[in-house]
Amino acid sequence: MNPFKDKRYESIHGLKDRQVLELGEYKGQVEERLKSWKEQKFSRRLWAKDHTLWFPGPKPEIADRLGWLELPEMMHERLDAFSSFAQGVKEEGISHVVLLGMGGSSLAPEVFQKTFGNAPGYPELFVLDSTHPSAIGSMEENLDLVRTLFLVSSKSGTTLETLSLFRYFWNQVNSLTDKPGSHFVAITDPGTPLMKLAKDRGFRQVFQANPDVGGRYSAFTDFGLVPAALIGMDIQRLLDKSRIASENVAFCDSEDRASGLILGAALGEVARSKDKLTFLTSPSLSGFTDWLEQLIAESTGKDGKGIIPVVSEPPSYIEEYGKDRFFVCLSLEGDNEAELEEQRRALEKAGHPTVLINLKEKYDLGQEIFCWEVAIASAGAVLGIHPFNQPDVQLAKDLAQKAMEKGQKPEGESDGPVETFSVEEPEVLTGALKNWIVQAQSGDYIALQAYLSPNVNTTRALQRIRFELLKHTKLATTLGYGPRFLHSTGQLHKGGPNIGLFLQLVDEPSVDLSIPETDYSFNTLIEAQALGDYQALKQRDRRVLRVNLKSDVSGGLDRLKDLIENLY
């Protein structure tokens, strides 16, 4: 069957007409790729966890990282335990659940809360993945700690940010009750240091996740399903939807009928010349792209290759988009879908390859999550990269740790000079901005790295800066809060192609918070993380401009935007 017949493909098991692919000149390449995969029995070998789909010889983190394929089937036996636990929390009157985690441990739960909300009577879920003292203080102000449950979520059980946040809130809860452990739950792999910590301190519960599933593929493990159950989601329905997608790519079915493989073939083939994968979404699905961003960036951004996910970019005129774009439109039926389809058709008319993905209901996210996991794994086979490791993430961590051990400030030096420009010196900063932007070339992208407290006003100001840069350079733009993005797009920044211009933004918080059981504070930690990231980028010959907004972040961002606007 031709997957592009009548501009649509039909697939089995309820996925009919889910995707519309308009690939233009790339149609033939994608069809040839699917034909080749069919001859090679790609699906059968995927389920057999055959490493030769990616490399001739065995590699670490391939065969032992494909456990996600069985999750839609095997996790059903755990759902009753998750739901029973969630019911107990609800009946106890817990009003908030705070997830302390980074990257793969936090992004799927955040998508679930943003997309579905918390059901009546169930607690609201907050995700805390920032080490900025203002972010932590703001979170605490919104909590009744006596009625709050903390999920300490870390696959390795050693994640620095997660453990630092745990120590802070453990100390706060410990001052209010003689049984602080009843307010804490651990989600981790078997046998980790976090498991021991939870046992020693009498945590309410420890959930052990599947060790053969990597973090960014863990949405249907305990890392995703426990938080989903706690906010009252129908986790049975979510998992049933994922099983539909799983059956769609079963080894007994044809590769050219498998939605995940078709999407993966398109992503891989188009990315050879159009690597800025830009997402447009229905309002109700906007949170899903943050999860996709990590899956794509961390899986493909290595060995000097990569697909650059562009999410939540400010809307712009079509003529301002470069020829390096590939657009994916995620549409929810009844949710502004006509406007999104109109955008897609205009992009197609302008010569951009596009994919439209239609969801009938929100729980179809279960299908989409699994479909995209298959797609990115198979796109890795096209690009010739290892989709399940993250070899360049550790560098920034090591440099941050070194900075903390030396007690250095950002203005100091470690492994090379650190040049920081201040918004309080506009003339000097203007010159630095000119020198930085003039390095831009066609096909590059601009990444804003905000080591700031994430909030609505700051995000709006950053988006205005992002729009100015897009408008004037015509380059794709991305935005991430640090240290959160270090566990998401950080791998791509350092291991992907050297086509990024990085604008690192730091501030000087007016307040600080000590981290109990350590000799450092959150301000020290986030300073070291920003510094380590800067040095890691410099080591990889990336083009980086570092700007200190001082203590007035709002005013500093406005001044920075004005300086950028006046460059042109």
Image (cartoon, helix red, strand yellow):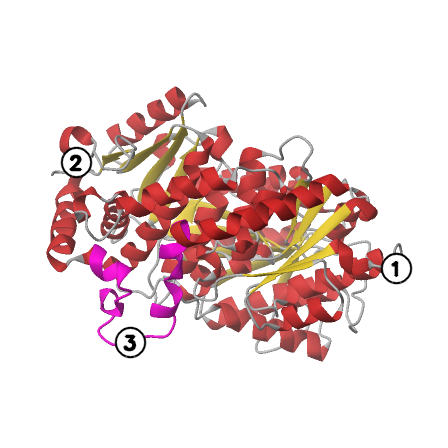
- Across and down, in percent, residue 382 comes to 23, 58
Which dot marks residue 4? 2
Which secondary structure lies at badge 3?
A: loop
Please determine whether, in this image, residue 347 is positioned above or below residue 444: above
- Across and down, in percent, residue 459 comes to 61, 41
Pair 2/3: label in front: 3
Pair 1/3: label in front: 1
Nearer to the camera, 429 or 250: 250
Residue in view at x 48 percent, y 62 percent: 210
Which dot marks residue 58? 3
Q: Which residues are magenta?
A: 43-72
Q: Quadrant of the N terminus?
A: top left
Is 47 colored magenta in this rendering? Answer: yes
Q: Are marks 1 and 3 in contact (CB under 8 Å)?
A: no
Residues under labels 1 and 2: Cα distance? 63 Å
Residue in view at x 48 percent, y 48 percent: 291
- Asked if residue 76 lies left or right of residue 486, the reply is left
Q: Which residue is mark 1?
A: 178
Residues under labels 2 and 3: Cα distance? 35 Å
Nearer to the camera, 343 or 355: 355
